Image (cartoon, rainbow, N blue to C red):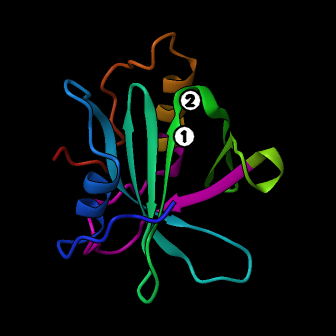
Amino acid sequence: MRATYAFAGAAAELARTAPLATGEEVLLHGVMRLRRVGRLPRPVVLRLTAPRLSLLTHYAFQPDRMWDLPRASIRDVRLQRRAVHVSWTSDADGGVAVIRLTGWTGRSAIDSSLRDAEAVADVLRSWLDSPDGRIAMRRPSSHRPR
């Protein structure tokens, strides 16, 4: 889906497009890189809460794209060649969609950086394996609370 534009940046767009429900706690939030074959890496704002994973891909010259994924739709999270692969059940793309994220290196103008893809994959797997989506607050070492 298209993100609702916000002059304040990608994190504000994420908050406007997929606002948190009352009492919904953010478990993990930060920026990673979207990796695709033949394309430049794109910044992705990731926000994890107990019921959902929200991803916003930032583009410079076109509308940003947003995925708001309920926990039940996530099929798999794995680490492959230092990249987090998240697959989910989708109405489009033949029923299964996959996104590949790598750690953000360098300075991020968008949000706090999530540099350690392995730690992010561990948090996402713990979230997926938990009965209710609540996990111990083990943030990757590269994550700074907001």
Q: Residue furthest bottom?
A: 61
The residue that appears at 45% across and 13% down in the rendered structure is: 132
Give above or below for 68 relative to 139: below
Q: Which residues are magenta?
A: 97-119
In the rendered structure, which amino acid carries the disc numbered 1? Ala
As drawn, the label of residue 76 is none
Closest to the observer: 130 or 121? 130
The residue that appears at 55% across and 25% down in the rendered structure is: 128
Q: Position of residue 116 (x, y in %)?
A: 45, 52
In the rendered structure, which amino acid carries the disc numbered 2? Arg
Please tell me whether residue 108 belongs to the stretch shown in magenta. yes
Q: Position of residue 11 (x, y in %)?
A: 27, 60
The residue that appears at 63% across and 34% down in the rendered structure is: 74
Q: Which residue is mark 1?
A: 121
Answer yes or no: is residue 141 visible: no
Q: Position of residue 98 (x, y in %)?
A: 70, 52
The residue that appears at 54% across and 40% down in the rendered structure is: 121
Give above or below for 118 relative to 51: below
Q: Within 10 angstroms of label 1, few (less than 14), some, or many (20 or more) residues?
A: many
Could you tell me how many numbered marks the image carries? 2
- Calculate the distance from the C-alpha at mark 2 to the C-alpha at mark 1: 6 Å
Q: Position of residue 120 (x, y in %)?
A: 47, 43
Give above or below for 67 relative to 39: above
Give the quarter of the image for residue 20: top left
Q: Which residue is mark 2?
A: 125
